[in-house]
Amino acid sequence: MKMSSTITYVRNYLARFLLIVGLLAALASWYFVSPQVDAVANTMNLWNMNIYNFTLFVGLITIVIRYSDGIRKRVKNWPYMAYGLVLIVGWIIMGEYLGLYSDFYQSAYLSTKITLHIAILGQLVFFLVSASYRVVRIRTLRTAVFGLSMMAMVVLNAPWLLGVFPAADKISYWLLNNPSMAGGRALLLTGGIGGVILGIRLLLGLERGALKSTER
Amino acid sequence: MLSVMFSMVSEIIQPGKSAQLLFLLLIGILGYTAYYLGTKGRTWEIRSLEGLEAMFEGVGRSAEMGRPILVLPGISDMGSPQTLAGITILGELTQQGAEIGVTTYSSNADSGVLTASEAVVRSAYAAVGKPELYSPGKYVRWFGNDQFAYAVGAAGQILADNPAVVVYLGYFLFDVIVDGETGNSIGAVQVGGTLGSMDFMSVFCDYILIGEELFAASAAISKDKNTIATIAGQDWVKLIVLGILIVGTLVSLAGSDAIVRLLEM
């Protein structure tokens, strides 16, 4: 399946152009003091919002098409798809007419969402117990360092340990405020640098992803 | 002259953000320079990442066991660099798997990520000359725009598809433990990379990608010399940061806050 050269060109360059415009809009008003820059940034942000809303719309259409296809072909679990589709349409109509922040919309949304959350949080206990056992299974040096550090923090914060060893909380605070904070900052720093370099790769078209065409 | 320059800069640039901007420009310049040198033939050897090696081996393992691969790009949207890293790895693994007949599945919590993942998977099948194997909705699933719905849905997917390898690359919160434990229960090899919840990942993952390795993985896996060159640029920036850290520590120990004031400019 060969894409036409026009579509390939559009996919390669238009997406990158939109990215650059979006990035400039975000960066300009963040770094520069100027009413003119702010005015341009505001206009760019409006365009960004339009693009973002468009992508949301594309996502919604993707889901509706997929679920409609699934229901039509009676795939496995299609009744759940039908239920999901009815809910999506229902929520859109309700949100449109009543407003997202109306009491009725919020109550209905939170009632359904929080009930599900509580049900899942209850189950999480069993997963946590199972995970606690797994901490003591050392597989690689890296996971061992992370796992043992986490186990040390859990043990040092246990109420029973404070009774027999009152200095435990001082040790845990020292660990949190020194090696843990330094490690956390290192992760953030390197993660931030990595994120910017990933952005450069995307803009240069080096990453194979949604911004790169199939032909290569 | 210098004071005039400083006052001009302070009029143009937001207070406290000059050093930030300078650093951002520096990262951009070094990243591009490394890429440029790469295009001119300069090559760099990069150390192997154990998580990355495990992913490579995982594709072969999946082929031998006749089981699929599952890639989870997390609960964030396309605005997160972590999600982008996860999606690019999805593309690479899908392509490598497609070449030897291994299926790669994915699921996500955001409709935008769903659309992007579909595009990436379609591209991967087209790139290996097997576009007929791709069908929308077959490889990428969506379980609702909520972290718990995603966690439970992905756990169900792990039980249903029985993958040989599960890759967690993206933004995750503590709900990932549901998927991690489920993956362990079926004996899958698990590779994880994220910035925030590394402690959870380290509990159930066999291999982890720490910090910037998450972003370097997609470049390293491609084995393209120009792409790998950008990792060299990333390392130059890390060296500069390391230098600032060391100098800053020494200067602070000497009783001066010059470096702090410089960074707060």
Image (spheres, rainbow, N blue to C red):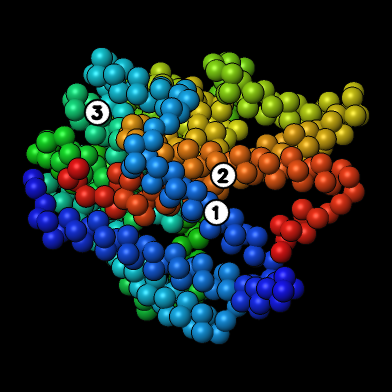
Chain of the residue that carries numbered disc 3 in the rendered image? B
Q: Quadrant of residue A11?
A: bottom left
Tell me: A207 left or right of B102: right
Give whichever of B98, B259 is nearer the camera: B259
**Residue B97, which numbered label?**
3
Marks 1 & 2, CB-CB < 8 Å contact: yes
Looking at the figure, which quarter contains the N terminus of chain B?
A: bottom right
Which residue position is annotated with label 2? B237
Identify the residue at image location x=75%, y=43%: B247
Q: Quadrant of residue B74?
A: top left
Q: Secondary structure at mark 1?
A: helix
Number of marks in the rendered image: 3
Tell me: A208 left or right of A170: left
Q: Secondary structure at mark 3?
A: helix
Q: Secondary structure at mark 2?
A: helix
Identify the residue at image location x=43%, y=27%: B45
